[in-house]
Amino acid sequence: MFDIGLLASRLSAATEWLVNRPDAEGCRIGYFGASTGAGAALWAAADSLIPIDAVVSRGGRPDLAMGRLARVTAPTLLIVGSLDSTVLGLNQQALVELGPPSKLSVVDGATHLFEEPGTLAEAALLARNWFVDRLLPLDADAGAGADSGAGSVR
Protein backbone atom coordinates (compact mmCIF):
# COMPACT_ATOMS: atom_id res chain seq x y z
CA MET A 1 0.00 0.00 0.00
CA PHE A 2 1.21 3.51 -0.82
CA ASP A 3 1.68 6.11 1.89
CA ILE A 4 -0.45 8.81 0.26
CA GLY A 5 0.10 11.21 3.15
CA LEU A 6 3.87 10.95 2.70
CA LEU A 7 3.60 11.49 -1.06
CA ALA A 8 1.33 14.50 -0.50
CA SER A 9 3.73 16.00 2.05
CA ARG A 10 6.61 15.64 -0.42
CA LEU A 11 4.58 17.39 -3.12
CA SER A 12 3.70 20.17 -0.67
CA ALA A 13 7.36 20.56 0.29
CA ALA A 14 8.39 20.79 -3.37
CA THR A 15 5.67 23.38 -3.96
CA GLU A 16 6.85 25.44 -0.99
CA TRP A 17 10.42 25.29 -2.28
CA LEU A 18 9.27 26.41 -5.72
CA VAL A 19 7.23 29.41 -4.62
CA ASN A 20 10.12 30.67 -2.51
CA ARG A 21 12.43 30.87 -5.55
CA PRO A 22 12.81 34.40 -6.95
CA ASP A 23 12.70 33.07 -10.53
CA ALA A 24 9.27 31.50 -9.88
CA GLU A 25 7.66 34.71 -8.63
CA GLY A 26 4.21 35.13 -10.10
CA CYS A 27 4.02 31.57 -11.40
CA ARG A 28 0.78 29.68 -11.01
CA ILE A 29 0.80 26.16 -9.60
CA GLY A 30 -0.78 23.08 -11.17
CA TYR A 31 -0.68 19.48 -9.98
CA PHE A 32 -0.97 16.42 -12.23
CA GLY A 33 -1.29 12.92 -10.85
CA ALA A 34 -2.09 9.51 -12.27
CA SER A 35 -3.56 6.58 -10.38
CA THR A 36 -2.40 6.71 -6.74
CA GLY A 37 -0.35 9.83 -7.54
CA ALA A 38 -3.63 11.62 -8.23
CA GLY A 39 -4.75 10.80 -4.70
CA ALA A 40 -1.56 12.40 -3.39
CA ALA A 41 -2.01 15.47 -5.62
CA LEU A 42 -5.58 15.96 -4.37
CA TRP A 43 -4.49 15.45 -0.74
CA ALA A 44 -1.70 18.03 -1.17
CA ALA A 45 -4.07 20.49 -2.87
CA ALA A 46 -6.55 20.11 -0.02
CA ASP A 47 -3.97 20.74 2.69
CA SER A 48 -1.89 23.39 0.91
CA LEU A 49 -1.42 26.81 2.44
CA ILE A 50 -0.18 27.90 -0.99
CA PRO A 51 -2.91 28.53 -3.57
CA ILE A 52 -3.03 25.69 -6.10
CA ASP A 53 -4.50 26.93 -9.37
CA ALA A 54 -5.40 23.67 -11.12
CA VAL A 55 -5.33 19.90 -10.62
CA VAL A 56 -5.59 17.12 -13.20
CA SER A 57 -6.18 13.52 -12.18
CA ARG A 58 -5.67 10.90 -14.92
CA GLY A 59 -7.10 7.49 -14.07
CA GLY A 60 -6.87 8.72 -10.51
CA ARG A 61 -7.73 7.26 -7.17
CA PRO A 62 -9.45 10.22 -5.49
CA ASP A 63 -10.81 7.85 -2.86
CA LEU A 64 -7.33 7.90 -1.30
CA ALA A 65 -7.99 11.56 -0.39
CA MET A 66 -11.77 11.26 0.09
CA GLY A 67 -11.88 12.89 3.53
CA ARG A 68 -10.11 15.96 2.14
CA LEU A 69 -11.78 16.50 -1.24
CA ALA A 70 -14.26 19.09 0.01
CA ARG A 71 -11.26 21.28 0.96
CA VAL A 72 -9.78 21.28 -2.57
CA THR A 73 -10.41 24.76 -3.96
CA ALA A 74 -8.44 24.35 -7.18
CA PRO A 75 -10.42 23.64 -10.35
CA THR A 76 -9.94 19.91 -10.81
CA LEU A 77 -10.25 17.81 -13.95
CA LEU A 78 -10.83 14.10 -13.43
CA ILE A 79 -9.96 12.07 -16.56
CA VAL A 80 -11.08 8.44 -16.58
CA GLY A 81 -11.37 5.73 -19.21
CA SER A 82 -14.89 4.57 -20.03
CA LEU A 83 -13.80 0.93 -19.65
CA ASP A 84 -12.30 1.48 -16.18
CA SER A 85 -15.60 0.99 -14.36
CA THR A 86 -14.25 0.81 -10.80
CA VAL A 87 -12.16 3.98 -11.09
CA LEU A 88 -14.94 5.71 -13.03
CA GLY A 89 -17.29 5.11 -10.09
CA LEU A 90 -14.72 6.43 -7.62
CA ASN A 91 -14.28 9.57 -9.71
CA GLN A 92 -18.02 10.12 -10.03
CA GLN A 93 -18.24 10.05 -6.22
CA ALA A 94 -15.24 12.37 -5.93
CA LEU A 95 -16.79 14.89 -8.32
CA VAL A 96 -19.70 15.30 -5.91
CA GLU A 97 -17.25 15.99 -3.06
CA LEU A 98 -15.13 18.38 -5.11
CA GLY A 99 -18.02 20.41 -6.48
CA PRO A 100 -17.68 23.19 -9.05
CA PRO A 101 -15.57 24.23 -10.88
CA SER A 102 -14.38 20.62 -11.13
CA LYS A 103 -15.23 18.37 -14.03
CA LEU A 104 -15.15 14.72 -15.07
CA SER A 105 -14.04 13.84 -18.61
CA VAL A 106 -14.49 10.25 -19.78
CA VAL A 107 -12.26 9.00 -22.59
CA ASP A 108 -14.27 6.53 -24.64
CA GLY A 109 -12.70 3.11 -25.12
CA ALA A 110 -9.92 3.63 -22.56
CA THR A 111 -8.97 1.28 -19.74
CA HIS A 112 -7.08 2.26 -16.58
CA LEU A 113 -3.67 2.76 -18.20
CA PHE A 114 -4.99 4.38 -21.40
CA GLU A 115 -3.10 1.81 -23.49
CA GLU A 116 -5.63 1.72 -26.33
CA PRO A 117 -4.61 3.57 -29.50
CA GLY A 118 -5.18 7.30 -29.21
CA THR A 119 -6.60 7.27 -25.69
CA LEU A 120 -3.49 8.51 -23.90
CA ALA A 121 -3.11 11.30 -26.46
CA GLU A 122 -6.74 12.26 -25.87
CA ALA A 123 -6.18 12.35 -22.11
CA ALA A 124 -3.03 14.43 -22.61
CA LEU A 125 -4.92 16.95 -24.75
CA LEU A 126 -7.64 17.27 -22.11
CA ALA A 127 -5.01 17.83 -19.39
CA ARG A 128 -3.08 20.32 -21.51
CA ASN A 129 -6.17 22.38 -22.23
CA TRP A 130 -7.20 22.38 -18.57
CA PHE A 131 -3.78 23.69 -17.54
CA VAL A 132 -3.54 26.23 -20.37
CA ASP A 133 -6.92 27.72 -19.44
CA ARG A 134 -6.11 27.91 -15.74
CA LEU A 135 -2.39 28.58 -15.53
CA LEU A 136 -1.52 30.86 -18.44
CA PRO A 137 -2.45 34.52 -18.73
CA LEU A 138 -5.61 35.08 -20.76
CA ASP A 139 -3.75 36.30 -23.83
CA ALA A 140 -0.95 33.67 -23.74
CA ASP A 141 -2.64 30.97 -25.80
CA ALA A 142 -5.86 32.24 -27.32
CA GLY A 143 -8.22 29.55 -28.41
CA ALA A 144 -6.71 26.60 -26.51
CA GLY A 145 -9.86 26.06 -24.47
CA ALA A 146 -10.24 23.31 -21.86
CA ASP A 147 -13.53 22.40 -23.44
CA SER A 148 -12.05 22.17 -26.91
CA GLY A 149 -10.42 18.98 -28.10
CA ALA A 150 -11.48 15.41 -27.82
CA GLY A 151 -13.35 13.55 -25.12
CA SER A 152 -16.87 13.14 -23.98
CA VAL A 153 -17.83 15.03 -20.88
CA ARG A 154 -20.20 13.61 -18.34
Image: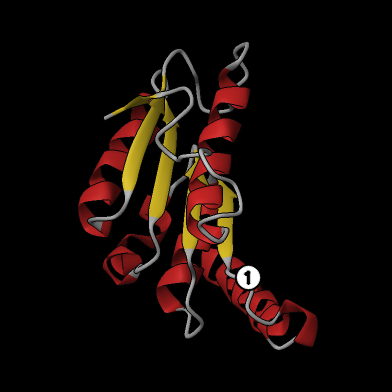
- When the figure is inspected, residue 139 is found, relative to residue 58, above or below; the finding is below
Badge 1 element = helix
Residue at 53% over, 39% down: 144
- When the figure is inspected, residue 100 is found, relative to residue 26, above or below; the finding is above
Percent across and percent down for residue 121 are 62, 24
Between 26 and 56, which is closer to the camera in this rendering? 26
Between 91 and 128, which is closer to the camera in this rendering? 128
71 relative position to 81: left or right: left
Note whether residue 39 is visible.
Answer: no
- When the figure is inspected, residue 5 is found, relative to residue 98, above or below; the finding is below
Percent across and percent down for residue 103 are 32, 44
Percent across and percent down for residue 53 are 48, 66
Q: How was the colour assigned to the protein in this rendering?
A: secondary structure
- Which quarter of the image is occupied by the N terminus? bottom right
Mark 1 residue type: Leu
How packed mark 1 is, by other alpha carbons closer than 10 Å (few <14, some 14-19, many 20 or more), is some
28 relative position to 49: left or right: right
Residue at 32% over, 51% down: 102
66 relative position to 26: left or right: left
Between 65 and 114, which is closer to the camera in this rendering? 114
According to the image, label 1 marks what residue? Answer: 11
Percent across and percent down for residue 41 are 52, 61
- Which quarter of the image is occupied by the C terminus? top left
Residue at 60% over, 34% down: 124
